Amino acid sequence: MSAFYQKILDNNRKWVAEKTEKDPEYFSRLSNGQTPPLLWIGCADSRVPANEITGTQPGEVFVHRNIANMVIHSDMNMLSVLDYAVNVLKVRHVIVCGHYGCGGVKAAMGNSQIGLIDNWIRHIKDVYRFHYLELDAIPDETQRFNRFVELNVVEQVKDLAKTSIVQNAWRSKQELWIHGWVYAINDGLVKDLGVNFCSSDELPDVYRLG
């Protein structure tokens, strides 16, 4: 057994001891169920922990993570999480959070073949195709990369609003907001991109479901 593996087991026991010393009822309260107000759709990058970034406690954030925080309409994993969060947990906010320096977005800017993940990255490349005029006009590669990260989040927020899950919630007058953020790993701050949806009225007609 590796030293790292034993370390994380020891860390768990230490964490439990610290929590129960401060609050003996902490775990019994958590075991009674969850009513998180927020669904977080973020990148799988290990440097982007949802609870720490938002200063929230266990039970306050329902989390789904994948490479480059994508919302893909054929992804049954993401759709299942979204359906449960919206229709069972009744979350009031969904945040799509990307991050500067995202490896998946960076890979989508190039032409290298990586492996199975190439099929996933193709969806990110579609975002570049939608916005290539703006992106190609940015001469600095780092600035272009950062803007691509932002535009990818914007497109994922729009794709969330297009789902039948979200639109049916809005149709039933359920309070549900969708937001787009980007996290800066170098200083820990989030940028609200100002792309927020609270009804299908903000979508083009072709995407509004009857």
Image (cartoon, rainbow, N blue to C red):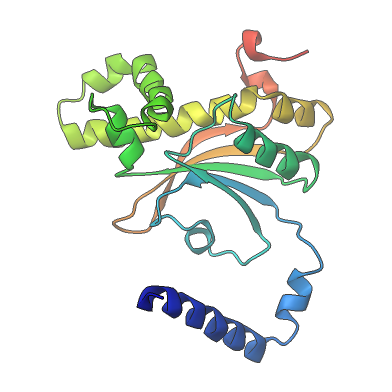
Q: Nearer the viewer, residue 55 or 78?
A: 78
Image position of 2 with respect to 121: above or below: below
Q: Residue furthest top?
A: 206
Relative image position of residue 97 (x, y in whole percent): 48, 44
User: Can residue 202 be seen in the rendering of this structure?
Assistant: yes
Question: Can residue 147 be seen here?
Answer: no
In which quadrant will I find the N terminus?
Answer: bottom left
| Residue lying at 66% horizontally and 60% vertically, measured from the top left | 60
Left or right: residue 46 versus residue 61 is left
Provide residue 64's location: percent of width, then percent of height: 57, 46
**What count of labels does the image hold?**
0
Q: Is residue 209 above or below residue 106?
A: above
Look at 77% across and 74% down and name the residue there.
29
Quadrant of the drawing holding the C terminus: top right
Which residue in the rendered view is the most extreme toward the right?
172
Relative depth, front residue between 159 and 143: 159
Instruction: Give the residue displayed 72% in from the left and 23% down from the top.
Output: 164
